[in-house]
Amino acid sequence: HSQASREHKHEVSGGARGGEQQPPPDIRHARVLSRWRNEPPRPSSDSVITVTAEDSAARWQQSRIEAVTSAYQLCRERGLTRIALVGAGRHTREVALPASTGCDVEIACILDDRAGEIGSVESIPVHPIADYPQTIEALVISSDAHEAKLGARCREVLGDRLPIIEPYRDAAALSGTGSR
């Protein structure tokens, strides 16, 4: 059996033969660390990666805040400064409202079909989706779990009267991983 790599090794290796070829030092070091030993493995600072659940949760929370902040920036770039959040749940309290700090948009109200039960969130009034204030310039969906459902509900009730921004779907579309 003849291997192409052996037939063309001289061309590929730049004329170096067998033992004359030396991989880069970092590759040699990695190979040494990966060799089997007949002893318990020793921890190495080069190869040990520790990720705690807290680190993972913090990165996930940060990515959510960044997605919503990008939605606010998109509104601002389009000149839409008076917005309504859609959804009065945990995402609004933990992500959307903290992300609005320092953004040049005004969250005038929150739209949710359970407005009568909720009343307000952090002193921001909650209105039913169909009864949005006419001064609103755009809607930002405030949910990662129910974003598509809330976006569809807004389009069903309001049609195309207002721009509807879905932070996670729009972020995926802009990064090339989404469906839009």
Image (spheres, rainbow, N blue to C red):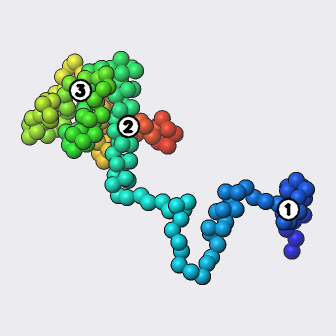
Which residue position is annotated with label 1? 20
Residue 167: assigned label: none
Residue 27: percent from left, percent from top: 68, 59
**Regarding mark 1 in the picture, which secondary structure is present there?**
helix
Which one is earlier in the sequence, the residue at label 1 or at label 3? 1
- At 32% from the left and 42% from the top, the residue drawn is 147
Q: Is residue 116 left or right of residue 89?
A: left
Q: Amino acid at mark 1?
A: Glu
Residue 127: percent from left, percent from top: 15, 31
Distance from disc 1 to disc 2, alpha carbons, whole Å, reads 51 Å
Q: Residues within 10 Å of mark 3 (few under 14, many from 20)?
A: many
Which residue position is annotated with label 3? 107
- At 37% from the left and 53% from the top, the residue drawn is 55
Disc 1 versus disc 3: nearer the observer: 1
Whether residue 152 appears in this view of the structure is: no
Residue 66: assigned label: 2
**Residue 131, relative to residue 32: is it above or below?**
above
Distance from disc 3 to disc 2, alpha carbons, whole Å, reads 17 Å
Whether residue 100 appears in this view of the structure is: yes
- At 33% from the left and 45% from the top, the residue drawn is 61
Q: Is residue 97 left or right of residue 4?
A: left
Q: Quadrant of the N terminus?
A: bottom right
Distance from disc 1 to disc 3, alpha carbons, whole Å, reads 67 Å
Q: Residues within 10 Å of mark 1 (few under 14, many from 20)?
A: few
Q: Is residue 20 left or right of residue 59?
A: right
**Regarding mark 3 in the picture, which secondary structure is present there?**
strand
Q: Amino acid at mark 3?
A: Ile
**Regarding mark 2 in the picture, which secondary structure is present there?**
helix
Are dots 1 and 2 in contact, CB under 8 Å? no
Residue 120: percent from left, percent from top: 12, 34
Which one is earlier in the sequence, the residue at label 1 or at label 2? 1
